[in-house]
Amino acid sequence: EMVNINELFNYLLDRFDMIIKNDDKPDKMYKITRKFTRKALWVEIDTDRFTQVIDNLMNNAIKYSPDGGTITCSLYETRNNVVLSVKDQGLGIPRNSLSKIFDRFYRVDKARSRAQGGTGLGLAISKEVIQALGGKLWVESTEGKGSTFYIALPYEPMEEDLWDEN
Ligand code: ATP
Ligand code: MG
């Protein structure tokens, strides 16, 4: 269906804001910051599957940031895409694991992540969902500093949007 990704992403982050606030762990202060275009951006997606992708990226950002920190989410458009990103200040991903984290069941340092739980399927499923939409999912990360996951989805501005700009 055609979905306003701006509204959906905001709605999903509102839910995480509530979870974070209800999850009273004084030693782990998480904060979500949004850098969003104000435009409505209509894209063809399956809302349930897309929700699954954002839930996994946000859960990862929280799980792999043991000391809390700011999770910065952004939404903007480029010439042919809408781009969403989720940036954390967590453990980061070692360089030699960067290409593997999208593989099924792969988890960086099993001892490290065992405590956090999880199957290692989240990113593999997320990548399939985004690729099925003709989009891309990728990561930039520095070990010890944090990670940024990006989603680019094909986007054609609607005629009304173009009119708005004039
Ligand atoms: P699941 O999502 O199935 O519950 P999972 O979170 O372990 O389990 P993925 O979401 O596929 O699986 O992530 C794979 C691995 O990539 C994780 O186990 C973790 O080692 C690493 N990883 C993913 N996101 C981050 C992140 N934001 N920061 C650091 N490491 C990450
Ligand atoms: Mg996960």
Image: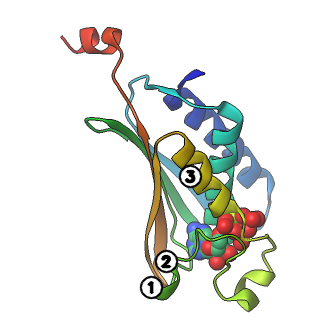
Q: Which mark is residue 32?
A: 3
- Of badges 1 and 3, the one in the foreground is 1
Q: Dot 3, how many residues are within 10 Å of its Cα: few (below 14), some (14-19), or many (20+)?
A: some
- Of badges 3 and 2, the one in the foreground is 2
- Element on which disc 1 rests: helix
Lower position in the chain sequence, tag 3 or tag 2:
3
Report if the CB atoms under discs 1 and 3 are less than 8 Å apart: no
- Element on which disc 2 rests: loop
Q: Image height check: is 88 above or below 41? A: below
Q: Amino acid at mark 3?
A: Ile
In the picture, measured across the screen, residue 47 lies left or right of residue 80, that is right
Q: Nearer the viewer, residue 106 or 35?
A: 106
Report if the CB atoms under discs 2 and 1 are less than 8 Å apart: yes
Counting from the top left corner in percent of width and height, residue 130 is at 55, 47
Quadrant position of the N terminus in the picture: top right
Q: Dot 1, how many residues are within 10 Å of its Cα: few (below 14), some (14-19), or many (20+)?
A: few
Q: Image height check: is 71 above or below 159? A: below
Q: Quadrant of residue 83?
A: top left
Instruction: Give the CA separation, mark 2 to mark 1.
Output: 5 Å
Instruction: Give the CA separation, mark 3 to mark 2.
Output: 24 Å
Counting from the top left corner in percent of width and height, residue 70 is at 53, 61
- Element on which disc 3 rests: strand
Q: Which mark is residue 95?
A: 1
Lower position in the chain sequence, tag 1 or tag 3:
3
Q: Amino acid at mark 2?
A: Leu
The reply to whether residue 80 is visible in this rendering is yes
**Which residue is at a point 50% across and 30% down the rendered structure image?**
6
Q: Image height check: is 159 above or below 126? A: above
Task: Report the residue marked by disc 2.
Answer: 98
The quadrant of the rendered image in which ligand 1 is seen is: bottom right
